[in-house]
Image (cartoon, rainbow, N blue to C red):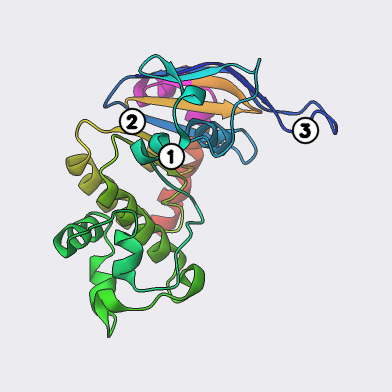
Amino acid sequence: MIRLENITKIYNEKVDDTKALDDVSLKIEDGEFISVMGASGSGKSTLVHLLNRLYDLPDGCGKITIGGVDIRDIDRQYLRSQIGMVLQEPFLYSGSIKENVGITKEISEFDDIREACEIACVDSAIDSFTDGYETIVGERGVTLSGGQKQRVAIARMLVEHTPVMIFDDSLSAVDAQTDAMIREALKKRMAGTTVILIAHRITTLMQADCIMVLEDGAVAEMGSHEQLMEHHGIYRRIYDIQMNTQLDADSV
Protein backbone atom coordinates (compact mmCIF):
# COMPACT_ATOMS: atom_id res chain seq x y z
CA MET A 1 0.00 0.00 0.00
CA ILE A 2 1.16 3.53 -0.83
CA ARG A 3 0.17 6.31 1.57
CA LEU A 4 0.63 10.03 1.08
CA GLU A 5 -0.06 11.89 4.30
CA ASN A 6 -0.58 15.65 4.46
CA ILE A 7 1.89 16.41 1.67
CA THR A 8 2.87 20.05 1.40
CA LYS A 9 5.73 21.12 -0.84
CA ILE A 10 6.98 24.73 -1.14
CA TYR A 11 8.27 25.82 -4.54
CA ASN A 12 10.72 28.38 -3.19
CA GLU A 13 10.25 29.98 0.21
CA LYS A 14 12.76 32.75 -0.66
CA VAL A 15 10.61 33.89 -3.58
CA ASP A 16 7.07 33.33 -2.32
CA ASP A 17 4.94 30.85 -0.42
CA THR A 18 3.26 29.32 -3.46
CA LYS A 19 2.54 25.70 -2.68
CA ALA A 20 2.92 23.04 -5.33
CA LEU A 21 0.96 20.70 -3.04
CA ASP A 22 -1.20 21.79 -0.14
CA ASP A 23 -2.17 19.17 2.47
CA VAL A 24 -2.67 16.32 0.00
CA SER A 25 -3.46 12.86 1.40
CA LEU A 26 -4.10 9.68 -0.59
CA LYS A 27 -4.16 5.94 0.09
CA ILE A 28 -3.46 3.59 -2.83
CA GLU A 29 -4.10 -0.12 -2.34
CA ASP A 30 -1.90 -2.69 -4.08
CA GLY A 31 -3.17 -3.25 -7.62
CA GLU A 32 -5.38 -0.13 -7.59
CA PHE A 33 -5.72 2.21 -10.58
CA ILE A 34 -5.59 5.89 -9.59
CA SER A 35 -5.88 8.79 -12.01
CA VAL A 36 -4.99 12.41 -11.37
CA MET A 37 -6.22 15.46 -13.25
CA GLY A 38 -5.89 19.19 -12.87
CA ALA A 39 -4.80 22.33 -14.69
CA SER A 40 -1.15 23.05 -15.44
CA GLY A 41 0.63 23.96 -12.22
CA SER A 42 -1.91 22.20 -10.00
CA GLY A 43 0.74 19.85 -8.57
CA LYS A 44 0.16 16.64 -10.56
CA SER A 45 3.75 16.02 -11.63
CA THR A 46 5.14 17.20 -8.30
CA LEU A 47 3.11 14.46 -6.63
CA VAL A 48 4.55 11.59 -8.67
CA HIS A 49 8.06 13.04 -8.76
CA LEU A 50 8.07 12.99 -4.96
CA LEU A 51 6.84 9.39 -4.99
CA ASN A 52 9.71 8.33 -7.25
CA ARG A 53 12.18 10.49 -5.29
CA LEU A 54 13.15 12.60 -8.27
CA TYR A 55 13.42 15.01 -5.39
CA ASP A 56 12.86 14.36 -1.71
CA LEU A 57 10.03 15.62 0.43
CA PRO A 58 11.52 18.11 2.92
CA ASP A 59 11.21 17.47 6.64
CA GLY A 60 7.96 18.74 8.10
CA CYS A 61 6.14 18.64 4.75
CA GLY A 62 4.28 15.37 5.22
CA LYS A 63 5.11 11.71 4.72
CA ILE A 64 5.05 9.14 1.93
CA THR A 65 5.20 5.45 2.81
CA ILE A 66 5.18 2.21 0.82
CA GLY A 67 4.26 -0.87 2.79
CA GLY A 68 4.48 1.25 5.93
CA VAL A 69 8.10 2.31 5.25
CA ASP A 70 9.00 5.97 4.73
CA ILE A 71 10.36 6.19 1.17
CA ARG A 72 13.21 8.39 2.43
CA ASP A 73 14.44 5.27 4.24
CA ILE A 74 14.38 3.21 1.03
CA ASP A 75 17.45 3.12 -1.19
CA ARG A 76 16.75 5.45 -4.10
CA GLN A 77 18.00 3.01 -6.74
CA TYR A 78 15.95 0.14 -5.31
CA LEU A 79 12.84 2.34 -5.07
CA ARG A 80 13.11 3.31 -8.72
CA SER A 81 13.59 -0.32 -9.72
CA GLN A 82 10.12 -0.95 -8.24
CA ILE A 83 8.39 2.14 -9.69
CA GLY A 84 8.28 2.57 -13.46
CA MET A 85 7.60 6.06 -14.77
CA VAL A 86 6.94 7.51 -18.22
CA LEU A 87 7.08 11.29 -18.53
CA GLN A 88 5.21 13.50 -20.98
CA GLU A 89 8.53 14.29 -22.69
CA PRO A 90 10.41 10.98 -22.37
CA PHE A 91 14.15 10.76 -22.94
CA LEU A 92 15.35 8.42 -25.66
CA TYR A 93 19.00 7.55 -26.21
CA SER A 94 20.92 7.74 -29.45
CA GLY A 95 20.69 4.10 -30.52
CA SER A 96 18.29 1.60 -32.00
CA ILE A 97 14.66 1.27 -30.96
CA LYS A 98 15.45 -2.23 -29.67
CA GLU A 99 18.23 -0.83 -27.48
CA ASN A 100 16.01 1.96 -26.16
CA VAL A 101 13.23 -0.42 -25.16
CA GLY A 102 15.50 -3.01 -23.59
CA ILE A 103 18.03 -0.67 -21.96
CA THR A 104 16.59 -0.93 -18.44
CA LYS A 105 17.32 -4.67 -18.14
CA GLU A 106 20.73 -6.32 -18.27
CA ILE A 107 19.36 -9.05 -20.50
CA SER A 108 16.26 -8.35 -22.60
CA GLU A 109 14.90 -11.03 -24.89
CA PHE A 110 13.66 -9.71 -28.21
CA ASP A 111 10.31 -11.45 -27.70
CA ASP A 112 9.81 -9.41 -24.50
CA ILE A 113 10.74 -6.21 -26.33
CA ARG A 114 8.35 -6.92 -29.17
CA GLU A 115 5.52 -7.87 -26.79
CA ALA A 116 6.00 -4.60 -24.89
CA CYS A 117 5.91 -2.63 -28.15
CA GLU A 118 2.73 -4.42 -29.19
CA ILE A 119 1.04 -3.47 -25.91
CA ALA A 120 2.22 0.12 -26.37
CA CYS A 121 0.76 0.08 -29.91
CA VAL A 122 4.03 1.12 -31.52
CA ASP A 123 5.01 -2.21 -33.13
CA SER A 124 3.29 -1.52 -36.47
CA ALA A 125 5.05 1.84 -36.76
CA ILE A 126 8.40 0.19 -36.01
CA ASP A 127 7.74 -2.53 -38.60
CA SER A 128 7.07 0.17 -41.20
CA PHE A 129 10.60 1.53 -40.80
CA THR A 130 13.18 0.18 -43.25
CA ASP A 131 15.40 -1.13 -40.44
CA GLY A 132 12.55 -2.11 -38.12
CA TYR A 133 13.68 -2.50 -34.52
CA GLU A 134 17.25 -1.69 -35.55
CA THR A 135 16.18 1.82 -36.62
CA ILE A 136 18.44 4.44 -35.03
CA VAL A 137 16.27 7.05 -33.34
CA GLY A 138 18.94 9.72 -32.86
CA GLU A 139 19.66 11.81 -29.78
CA ARG A 140 16.48 12.35 -27.75
CA GLY A 141 14.54 10.36 -30.35
CA VAL A 142 14.49 13.12 -32.97
CA THR A 143 13.56 10.72 -35.77
CA LEU A 144 10.29 9.73 -34.08
CA SER A 145 7.06 11.66 -33.67
CA GLY A 146 5.96 12.78 -30.21
CA GLY A 147 3.43 9.98 -29.94
CA GLN A 148 5.95 7.36 -31.11
CA LYS A 149 8.47 8.53 -28.52
CA GLN A 150 5.88 8.25 -25.76
CA ARG A 151 4.91 4.75 -26.87
CA VAL A 152 8.53 3.58 -27.07
CA ALA A 153 9.04 4.90 -23.52
CA ILE A 154 5.91 3.03 -22.36
CA ALA A 155 7.29 -0.16 -23.91
CA ARG A 156 10.60 0.41 -22.11
CA MET A 157 8.76 0.63 -18.78
CA LEU A 158 6.72 -2.50 -19.54
CA VAL A 159 9.90 -4.52 -20.06
CA GLU A 160 10.87 -3.72 -16.45
CA HIS A 161 7.76 -5.46 -15.01
CA THR A 162 7.64 -3.06 -12.04
CA PRO A 163 4.85 -3.50 -9.43
CA VAL A 164 4.04 0.24 -9.65
CA MET A 165 3.66 2.15 -12.94
CA ILE A 166 3.29 5.90 -13.29
CA PHE A 167 2.12 7.59 -16.49
CA ASP A 168 2.82 11.32 -16.19
CA ASP A 169 0.65 12.65 -19.03
CA SER A 170 2.47 10.15 -21.25
CA LEU A 171 -0.47 9.55 -23.61
CA SER A 172 -0.92 13.23 -24.47
CA ALA A 173 0.68 12.98 -27.92
CA VAL A 174 -1.40 10.05 -29.18
CA ASP A 175 -4.87 10.28 -30.71
CA ALA A 176 -7.94 9.18 -28.74
CA GLN A 177 -8.31 5.88 -30.61
CA THR A 178 -4.69 4.85 -30.01
CA ASP A 179 -5.02 6.00 -26.40
CA ALA A 180 -7.98 3.64 -25.94
CA MET A 181 -6.14 0.74 -27.61
CA ILE A 182 -3.11 1.21 -25.35
CA ARG A 183 -5.23 1.38 -22.20
CA GLU A 184 -7.13 -1.77 -23.18
CA ALA A 185 -3.89 -3.67 -23.81
CA LEU A 186 -2.37 -2.34 -20.59
CA LYS A 187 -5.41 -3.43 -18.59
CA LYS A 188 -4.83 -7.05 -19.60
CA ARG A 189 -1.06 -6.85 -18.99
CA MET A 190 -1.15 -4.92 -15.71
CA ALA A 191 -3.54 -7.01 -13.65
CA GLY A 192 -2.33 -6.68 -10.07
CA THR A 193 -0.08 -3.71 -10.89
CA THR A 194 -0.58 -0.42 -9.06
CA VAL A 195 -1.12 2.31 -11.65
CA ILE A 196 -1.04 6.10 -11.25
CA LEU A 197 -2.07 7.92 -14.41
CA ILE A 198 -1.98 11.67 -15.00
CA ALA A 199 -3.95 12.95 -17.97
CA HIS A 200 -6.15 15.77 -19.23
CA ARG A 201 -8.38 13.63 -21.45
CA ILE A 202 -11.47 12.48 -19.51
CA THR A 203 -11.80 9.27 -21.50
CA THR A 204 -8.27 8.35 -20.38
CA LEU A 205 -9.12 8.95 -16.71
CA MET A 206 -12.66 7.73 -16.26
CA GLN A 207 -12.03 3.99 -15.88
CA ALA A 208 -9.80 4.44 -12.82
CA ASP A 209 -10.84 3.04 -9.44
CA CYS A 210 -10.37 6.52 -8.00
CA ILE A 211 -9.92 9.92 -9.65
CA MET A 212 -8.22 12.76 -7.78
CA VAL A 213 -8.79 16.30 -9.01
CA LEU A 214 -6.14 18.83 -7.98
CA GLU A 215 -6.67 22.58 -7.99
CA ASP A 216 -3.93 25.00 -6.90
CA GLY A 217 -2.10 22.15 -5.21
CA ALA A 218 -5.03 20.98 -3.11
CA VAL A 219 -7.45 18.07 -3.54
CA ALA A 220 -10.63 19.62 -4.93
CA GLU A 221 -12.49 16.34 -5.56
CA MET A 222 -11.89 12.63 -5.22
CA GLY A 223 -13.96 9.60 -6.14
CA SER A 224 -15.00 7.30 -8.97
CA HIS A 225 -16.21 8.60 -12.32
CA GLU A 226 -19.83 8.00 -11.29
CA GLN A 227 -19.39 9.77 -7.96
CA LEU A 228 -17.71 12.80 -9.51
CA MET A 229 -20.36 13.04 -12.21
CA GLU A 230 -23.02 13.26 -9.51
CA HIS A 231 -21.03 15.89 -7.63
CA HIS A 232 -21.35 18.45 -10.46
CA GLY A 233 -17.97 20.00 -9.67
CA ILE A 234 -14.78 20.55 -11.65
CA TYR A 235 -14.67 17.01 -13.07
CA ARG A 236 -18.28 17.12 -14.31
CA ARG A 237 -17.73 20.54 -15.84
CA ILE A 238 -14.63 19.39 -17.76
CA TYR A 239 -16.40 16.19 -18.80
CA ASP A 240 -19.30 18.16 -20.29
CA ILE A 241 -16.93 20.49 -22.14
CA GLN A 242 -14.83 17.67 -23.61
CA MET A 243 -17.80 15.51 -24.58
CA ASN A 244 -19.61 18.43 -26.21
CA THR A 245 -16.43 19.36 -28.08
CA GLN A 246 -16.12 15.79 -29.33
CA LEU A 247 -19.76 15.74 -30.44
CA ASP A 248 -19.24 19.00 -32.33
CA ALA A 249 -16.12 17.57 -34.02
CA ASP A 250 -17.95 14.35 -34.99
CA SER A 251 -20.81 16.33 -36.55
CA VAL A 252 -18.52 18.27 -38.87
**Dot 3 lies on which element?**
loop
Which of the image's four quarters has the N terminus? top left
| Segment tinted magenta in the rendering | 222-237
**Dot 2 lies on which element?**
loop
How would you classify the magenta stretch by its main secondary structure? Answer: helix
Residue, disc 1: 77
The quadrant where residue 136 appears: bottom left
Looking at this view, is 246 or 161 the one in front? Answer: 161
Q: What residue type is labelled 2?
A: Ala
Looking at this view, is 78 or 161 the one in front? Answer: 78
Residue 217 is situated, as x and y percent measured from the top left of the image, at 63, 27
Mark 2 or 3, nearer chain start = 3
**Residue at image coords 32%, 19%:** 29
**Residue at image coords 32%, 25%:** 209
- Give the mark toward the camera: 2 or 3: 3
- Give the mark toward the camera: 1 or 2: 1
Residue 127 shown left or right of residue 229 in the figure: left
Residue 206 visible in this rendered orientation of the protein: no
Q: What residue type is labelled 1?
A: Gln
Residue, disc 3: 12
Residue 203 is situated, as x and y percent measured from the top left of the image, at 37, 41
